[in-house]
Image (spheres, rainbow, N blue to C red):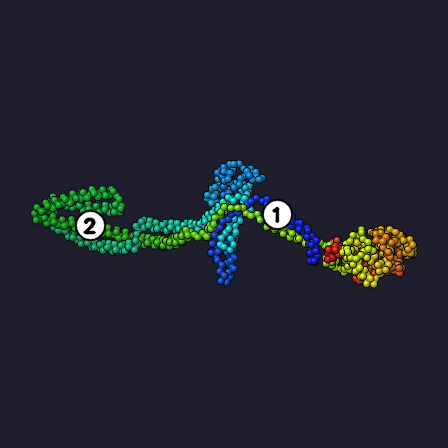
């Protein structure tokens, strides 16, 4: 687009742009002035993001750390503005405004449902009360989710009615952003109530800090809880294995396998030694008994009552001692729990003591017996003692053999039990190491959890705003005026850009791509006097420009060395007739005789403009008659409104036939040759090319074709087809005239 043309349009529309700017400025001023006052309060929270990921310009790629810093702030802001946290603030605001205490005090609430416009909530006081109880529970225990979808719907409806809903708070009230290039987050709240601003900011940052700490501790506690469970499981396994081993040792009476094994070996050796000793005594005792038996027989059967009584008591003592030994074995095997055996042993012991006492008395009685009697008695005594020793040795051997068998069995069991114990000890060792490792991890996790670093802290609480925020009426009004001017300018530019009319030379050449003979500006034809026009002294710029435009075109026509000119156009009402008449007058000023042939049979405007018939003109009598054209044409002169001299016109009587059909059977070319003898130039007018084929049929009768385009009209596809035809004429197509130009587009 021609910039000069665009600037010309802007200059012509400057008042429109100014009006738009003024309207936008005034409207914005009054609109902003009528808005209610708003207050703004803000608080600061330090994040330690920069401290953790500080940007070091000495690093190879410091911008990477800057990227992480920015991402850290974006993540923090995203978390703070999540629906979960905003819903928590909404819950706090609802609890504040809908609690019984706040409702009782008019100044205790920030907003009241009864004062909200277009609010009609279909919920009962009971449902609202239940909602308040739920919200209080969630605030107290830092819970987020609603288990009842219906109650969550009520929550959203009530919040929306009071302007505390998620979208409303983020859009109109709550703003969170990084404070410059610092490590701090700026939390800002704007509303119509200064108390609401301060309360909302302080409540939000305190609650978010609680939620943040709870989440951080929960993450640490999750690890601690997991390791605590692992520790308890490892401890339980260790204690289970230990108890299992102790129970097995108790069951098998195995406490120290190595010591017990050494004890068994020592006892076995001792028993074997004692067993050999006792076995070696048995043959000797038996030999002594046999020898004593022989001596007693040699002495005869000399006996007396004392001997018999002594033998009897010795036998009884021997039997009772044997029985006591048996009972001792039974008591030992029962683990000292067999009461019957213990009681029987006590009774036998009493009898044994009596028998032994009686033997002592008999021994004293023997001392009073003569020597020969004592010898026999002594033999008996020795024999009895030998039998007692033999019996004792026999019993001792049996006991030692039983002990040896028991020890052998115990030793076999000890090997098996020792393998079981060793396996358990190995498992216990593994379990203990696992327990110690888990316990260490647990202690480290617990220590880390207790020392968890929470970087988010409240740096500055919000304070009560002292005055409302500036409405910036002047700034916004000026901005609105500028925007209005810019938008109107852009709109005008777009209209000009998409305007396909050929209202400038550059646009004509762009859309038609044909040679331009000249331009003719638009004038008021009602008051136009051509004779005065060409004799004026240049006091009217519009008429002077029009006059010079005609002179330029006149020069081109004279320089063309042609006589016949066909004026055509792509569409109707392009100004062909007016242009032909004015050019004819411009030529007559130079004593040129002009003939205008109205061959526009569809719209014979030229014929209608010339109302006086020239009866005496030879053209009507001779040329028209000789060429049999008097039925189609009539010879006239133009007297109204231009009163032209030296300009004749052959008007047509109108027809819906094409020129070739009108001229069929007639020598129109010969007729034109006869006219050339009397006129310097012959101008033809044709019907519009988009609608009729007249131009194509008349082209053969003329020397040059001139196309007339109206600057006010658009160039459409059908026009381009007609233009392509004109271009195909080659040298016969003289060029185009851009008619009805706005004088401002020519400057």
Q: Is residue 516 left or right of residue 56?
A: right
Q: Is residue 253 left or right of residue 578?
A: left
Q: Is residue 532 left or right of residue 145?
A: right
State the residue at coordinates (89%, 52%): 613
Above or below, 202 relative to 664: above
Quarter of the image that includes the N terminus:
bottom right
The Cα–Cα distance between marks 2 and 1, rounded to whole angstroms, is: 133 Å
Q: Position of residue 218 (x, y in %)?
A: 45, 49
Which disc, if any, is residue 405?
A: none
Q: Which residue is mark 1?
A: 28
State the residue at coordinates (68%, 50%): 16
Residue 11's image quarter? bottom right
Can see residue 725?
A: no
Image marks 2 and 1: residues in contact by CB distance under 8 Å: no
Between 523 and 486, the one nearer to me in the picture: 523
* Element class at badge 1: helix
Q: Residues within 10 Å of mark 1 (few under 14, many from 20)?
A: many
Tag nearer the camera, 2 or 1: 1
Q: Position of residue 264 (x, y in %)?
A: 27, 54
* Element class at badge 2: helix
Q: Earlier in the sequence, mark 2 or mark 1?
A: 1
Which disc, if any, is residue 392?
A: 2
């Amino acid at each position: 687009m021609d910039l000069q043309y665009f600037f010309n349009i802007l200059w012509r529309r400057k008042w429109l742009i100014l009006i738009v700017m003024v309207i936008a400025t005034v409207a914005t001023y009054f609109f902003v002035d009528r808005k209610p006052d708003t207050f703004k309060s803000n608080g600061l929270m330090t994040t330690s993001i920069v401290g953790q990921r500080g940007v070091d310009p000495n690093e190879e790629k410091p911008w990477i750390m800057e990227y992480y810093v920015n991402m850290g702030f974006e993540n923090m802001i995203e978390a703070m503005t999540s629906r979960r946290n905003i819903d928590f603030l909404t819950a706090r605001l609802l609890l504040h405004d809908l609690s019984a205490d706040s409702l009782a005090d008019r100044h205790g609430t920030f907003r009241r449902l009864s004062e909200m416009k277009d609010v009609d909530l279909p919920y009962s006081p009971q449902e609202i009360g239940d909602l308040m109880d739920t919200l209080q529970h969630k605030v107290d225990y830092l819970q987020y989710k609603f288990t009842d979808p219906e109650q969550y719907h009520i929550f959203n409806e009530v919040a929306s009615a009071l302007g505390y809903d998620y979208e409303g708070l983020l859009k109109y009230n709550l703003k969170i952003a990084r404070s410059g290039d610092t490590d701090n987050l700026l939390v800002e709240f704007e509303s119509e109530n200064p108390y609401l601003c301060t309360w909302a900011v302080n409540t939000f940052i305190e609650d978010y800090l609680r939620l943040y700490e709870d989440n951080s501790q929960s993450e640490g506690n999750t690890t601690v809880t997991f390791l605590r469970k692992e520790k308890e499981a490892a401890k339980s396994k260790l204690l289970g294995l230990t108890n299992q081993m102790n129970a097995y040792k108790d069951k098998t009476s195995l406490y120290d396998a190595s010591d017990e094994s050494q004890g068994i070996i020592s006892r076995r050796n001792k028993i074997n030694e004692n067993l050999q000793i006792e076995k070696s005594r048995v043959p000797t005792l038996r030999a002594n008994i046999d020898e004593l038996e022989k001596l007693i027989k040699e002495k005869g059967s000399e006996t007396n009552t004392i001997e018999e009584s002594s033998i009897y008591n010795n036998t009884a003592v021997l039997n009772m001692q044997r029985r006591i030994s048996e009972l001792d074995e039974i008591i030992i095997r029962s683990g000292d729990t067999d009461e019957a055996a213990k009681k029987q042993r006590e009774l036998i012991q009493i009898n044994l003591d009596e028998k032994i006492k009686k033997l002592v008395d008999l021994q004293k009685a023997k001392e009073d017996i003569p020597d020969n009697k004592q010898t026999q008695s002594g033999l008996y005594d020795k024999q009895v003692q030998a039998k007692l020793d033999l019996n004792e040795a026999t019993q001792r051997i049996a006991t030692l053999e039983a002990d040896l068998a028991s020890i052998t069995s115990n030793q076999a069991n000890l090997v098996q039990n020792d393998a079981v114990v060793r396996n358990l000890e190995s498992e216990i060792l593994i379990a203990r190491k696992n327990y110690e490792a888990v316990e260490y991890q647990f202690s480290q996790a617990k220590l880390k959890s207790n020392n968890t670093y929470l970087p988010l802290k409240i740096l500055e609480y919000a304070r009560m705003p002292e005055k409302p925020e500036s409405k910036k009426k002047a700034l916004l009004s000026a901005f609105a005026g500028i925007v209005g001017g810019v938008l109107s300018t852009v709109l005008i530019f777009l209209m000009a850009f998409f305007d396909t009319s050929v209202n400038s030379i550059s646009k004509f050449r762009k859309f038609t791509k044909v040679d331009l003979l000249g331009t003719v500006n638009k004038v008021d034809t009602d008051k136009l006097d051509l004779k005065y026009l060409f004799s004026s002294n240049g006091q009217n710029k519009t008429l002077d420009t029009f006059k010079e435009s005609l002179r330029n075109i006149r020069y081109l026509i004279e320089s063309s060395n042609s006589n016949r000119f066909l004026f055509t156009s792509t569409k109707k009402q392009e100004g062909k007739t007016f242009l032909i008449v004015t050019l004819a007058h411009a030529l007559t000023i130079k004593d040129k005789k002009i003939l205008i042939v109205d061959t526009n049979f569809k719209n014979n405007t030229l014929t209608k403009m010339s109302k006086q018939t020239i009866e005496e003109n030879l053209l009507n009598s001779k040329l028209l008659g000789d060429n049999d054209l008097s039925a189609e044409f009539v010879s006239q002169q133009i007297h109204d409104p231009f009163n032209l001299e030296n300009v004749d016109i052959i008007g047509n009587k109108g027809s819906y036939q094409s020129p070739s059909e009108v001229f069929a059977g007639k020598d129109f070319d010969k007729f034109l040759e006869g006219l050339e003898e009397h006129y310097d130039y012959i101008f033809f007018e044709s019907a519009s090319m988009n609608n009729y084929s007249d131009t194509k049929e008349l082209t053969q009768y003329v020397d040059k074709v001139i196309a007339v385009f109206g600057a006010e009209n658009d160039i459409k596809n059908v026009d381009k087809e007609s233009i392509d035809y004109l271009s195909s004429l080659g040298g016969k197509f003289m060029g185009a005239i851009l008619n009805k130009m706005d004088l401002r587009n020519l400057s």
